[in-house]
């Protein structure tokens, strides 16, 4: 069974960089699929942040692209998110999730449990 | 970016009701649409992909239909465990992959 688990600081100061890691078990990242980050501000909807393939190929949401970096570590079977220059608007539950490579497989079939990141001084 | 609009944003229903949620895309997305269920404090769960294909393990009371710009999620006989928020997501044009704003189904 594919499992994803987010980890990282739950509190980040304004203007600093948010860093999260998603550890994958039950499936090798190198075997395929895109691995993505999605966030959900408290009481609001879902926003896709970006995704990465094991080769390092990435897609980013244009609205966040200037501040986002996603990387992959196949040796540890995990991938990471960095979001720079955070503000209170970046306070959200951050999920990692898996989706297919081909167009017709672009839905998110496995999700992590999510981790709340609060931006506050 | 393709905008996904769900209606209604929320509504109340009773156990046993047949309920329908609508999702409209700002441009045609063929059948590249998924539906998710999210309960409070939990991650979204994939229910349907390709507009009408039930994900493994999802009860058959859930069904999806539509293509192009207009889609529906139907729950044929609402159960207590179905009270949740539902999201649609398009994967026809990316980046970005985009979600609807959500529809909350509450107990009447």
Image (tube, coloured by chain):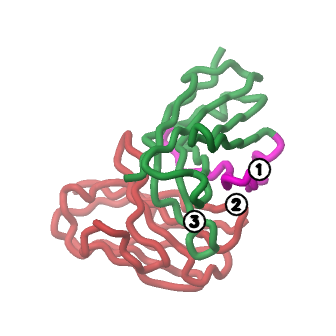
Relative depth, front residue between A44 and A95: A95
The local secondary structure at tag 3 comes to: loop
| Chain under numbered label 1 | A
Q: Which region is colored magenta? A: A41-66
The local secondary structure at tag 1 comes to: loop
From where the camera sits, is residue B19 visible? yes
Q: Which mark is residue B5?
A: none
Q: Quadrant of residue A22?
A: top right
Q: Which residue is mark 1?
A: A63
Q: Which residue is mark 2?
A: B96
Query: Which residue occupies 78% across, 29% down?
Result: A85
Query: Which residue occupies 51% across, 36% down?
Result: A6
Indicate whether residue A72 is drawn in magenta. Answer: no
Chain in red colour: B
Residue A45, image x and y in percent?
53, 50
Chain A, colour shown? green
A38 vs A5: above or below:
below
In front: label 3 or label 1: 3
**CB within 8 Å, label 1 to label 2:** yes
Q: Which residue is mark 3?
A: A100
**Furthest residue in direction left, as rendered:** B16
In front: label 2 or label 3: 3
Query: Which residue occupies 35% across, 48% down?
Result: B39
Residue A26, image x and y in percent?
43, 49
| Chain under numbered label 3 | A
Q: Residues within 10 Å of mark 2 (few under 14, many from 20)?
A: many
Q: Residues within 10 Å of mark 3 (few under 14, many from 20)?
A: some
């Amino acid at each position: 069974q594919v499992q994803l688990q987010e980890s990282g600081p739950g509190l980040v100061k304004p203007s600093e960089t948010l860093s999260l890691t998603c550890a994958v078990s039950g499936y090798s990242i190198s075997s395929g699929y895109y691995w993505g980050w999605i966030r959900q501000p408290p009481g609001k909807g879902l926003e896709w942040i970006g995704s990465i393939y094991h080769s390092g190929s990435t897609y980013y949401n244009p609205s966040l692209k200037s501040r986002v970096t996603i990387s992959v570590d196949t040796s540890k079977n995990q991938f990471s998110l960095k979001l720079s220059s955070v503000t209170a608007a970046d306070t959200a539950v951050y999920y990692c999730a898996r989706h297919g490579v081909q167009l017709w497989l672009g839905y998110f079939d496995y999700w992590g449990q999510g981790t709340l990141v609060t931006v506050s001084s | 970016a393709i905008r996904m609009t769900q209606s209604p944003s929320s509504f109340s229903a009773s156990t046993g009701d047949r309920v329908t949620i609508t999702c409209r895309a700002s441009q045609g997305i063929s059948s590249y649409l998924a539906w998710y269920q999210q309960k409070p404090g939990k991650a979204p769960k994939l229910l349907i992909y390709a507009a009408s294909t039930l994900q493994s393990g999802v009860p058959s009371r859930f069904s999806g239909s539509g293509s192009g710009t207009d889609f529906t999620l139907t729950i044929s006989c609402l159960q207590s465990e179905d009270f949740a928020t539902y999201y649609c997501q398009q994967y026809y044009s990316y980046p970005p992959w985009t979600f609807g704003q959500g529809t909350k189904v509450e107990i009447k």
